[in-house]
Amino acid sequence: MNEKFIEERKAALEARRDELKKELNTSADQIAENDYDAKFIDLGDKDDENAAEVAMFEKNLSMEKTLEVSLYNVNKALKKINEGNYGICEKCKSLIKPDRLKAFPSATACMKCKEKLL
Ligand SMILES: [Zn+2]
């Protein structure tokens, strides 16, 4: 893989990381560098208010989980770039196809291994 390709993936990953952090901030509170807790919004003490609070919290929680996993994967890919082992399948150690990395820069497994997991 050439350096330019990796630089482009790095830029894409960094943009994605900022995006994810922004999205996370709307549904969660940051409690550590890469750790978030779903927001709980206090609307009041009435039954319907409590029900709305729970519904909102559940929505935030599922969103927070999805976003947090994505952020984790993006950070992991950026770490791999720094360590010089970006684009290597974690399962079979073969090179992940550039097309796959273009479409999905945080991919950690090649298509073959990914299909086996599904
Ligand atoms: Zn593989």
Image (tube, rainbow, N blue to C red):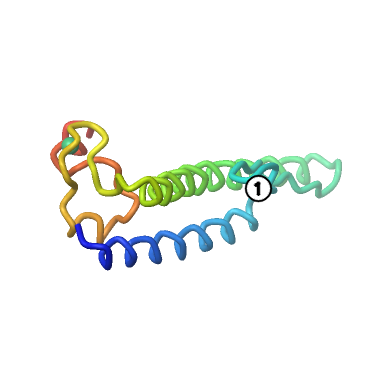
| Closest to the observer, 82 or 19 | 82
| Closest to the observer, 90 or 68 | 90
Which residue carries the number 1 mark?
56
Task: Tell me: residue 67, above or below residue 2.
Answer: above
Disc 1 crowd rating (10 Å Cα; few below 14, some 14-19, many 20+) is: some
Give the amino acid at mark 1.
Met
Q: Quarter of the image holding residue 12?
A: bottom left
Q: Quadrant of the N terminus?
A: bottom left
Please state if 39 lies on the left or on the right of 67 as rendered.
right
Name the residue: 41% across, 59% down. 13
**Residue 74 screen position, x and y as percent:** 42, 50
Element assignment for label 1: helix
**Residue 107 screen position, x and y as percent:** 30, 47
| Closest to the observer, 65 or 95 | 95
**Quarter of the render that holds ligand 1:** top left
Name the residue: 17% across, 59% down. 99
Task: Tell me: residue 20, above or below residue 58.
Answer: below
In the image, farthest residue toward the right: 45
Q: Quadrant of the C terminus?
A: top left
**Residue 110 screen position, x and y as percent:** 19, 43
Please state if 37 lies on the left or on the right of 108 as rendered.
right
